Image (cartoon, grey):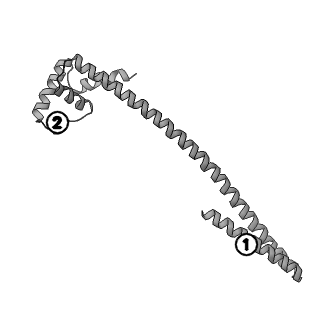
């Protein structure tokens, strides 16, 4: 917006000085004064022209950036949908594995919270149970899955994703 105001001001200065030069020529003002004002007209015109050109270029760049941003947003929405689908499929795989290990509903809840990285204390708060109950359920989970602890339990679900 500032650029447009400056370009407009320079254009007005150029026009007014040009009219002044024409008036000075008619009045027979010395040549050095006419040349001086003509230089001001010329510089004002060049400055206004340059600003107008820059405004045009920036407008084109902004339009291009807008198109690029729109395309990126669309791509991100597609990725988000793919991630939602992948998350759903992964959850189904985890659920199937919990069923294969014959875990109870409570053990499955604890197992999911363990996979999310919550501590025993945090799981107890989330589930409104005692920390001791969570520890017992975690121990049963490790026993049913034949895994040696939280890290091995988490790694069991992640190792297929690592190359």
Q: Is residue 7 left or right of residue 74?
A: right
Crowding around mark 1 (Cα neighbors within 10 Å: few <14, some 14 to 19, many 20+) is: some
In this image, 34 relative to 99: left or right? right
Which residue is identified by label 2?
Answer: 127
Is residue 141 placed above or below 10 in the rendered structure?
above
Which residue is disc 1 drawn over?
Answer: 13
Q: Quadrant of residue 134?
A: top left
Instruction: Point out residue 98 in the picture as x, y percentages from the top left corner.
Output: 23, 21
- The secondary element bearing badge 2 is classed as helix
Are the residues at dot 2 and dot 1 in contact (C-beta closer than 8 Å)?
no
Task: Judge from the rendering whether residue 105 lies leftward or rightward of residue 4; answer left or right.
Answer: left
Tell me: residue 94, above or below residue 52. above
Residue for point 47% across, 33% down: 78
- Between the C-alphas of marks 2 and 1, the distance is 75 Å
Q: Which mark is residue 83?
A: none
Q: Position of residue 118 (x, y in %)?
A: 23, 35
Q: Position of residue 56 (x, y in %)?
A: 67, 54
As helix, strand or loop, the secondary structure at mark 1 comes to: helix
The quarter of the picture where the N terminus appears is: bottom right
């Amino acid at each position: 917006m500032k650029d447009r105001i400056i370009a407009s001001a320079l254009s007005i200065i150029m026009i007014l000085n040009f009219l002044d030069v024409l008036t000075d020529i008619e009045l027979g003002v010395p040549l050095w004064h006419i040349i001086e004002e003509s230089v001001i007209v010329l510089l004002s015109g060049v400055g206004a022209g340059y600003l107008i050109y820059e405004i045009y270029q920036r407008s084109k760049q902004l339009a291009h950036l807008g198109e690029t941003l729109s395309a990126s947003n669309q791509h991100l929405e597609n990725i988000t949908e793919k991630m939602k689908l992948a998350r759903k499929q992964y959850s189904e795989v985890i659920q199937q594995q919990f069923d294969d290990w014959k875990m109870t509903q409570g053990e499955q809840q604890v197992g999911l919270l363990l996979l999310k990285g919550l501590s025993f204390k945090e799981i107890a708060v989330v589930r409104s149970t005692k920390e001791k109950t969570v520890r017992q359920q975690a121990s049963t989970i490790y026993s049913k899955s034949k895994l040696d602890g939280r890290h091995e339990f988490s790694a069991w679900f992640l190792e297929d994703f690592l190359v």
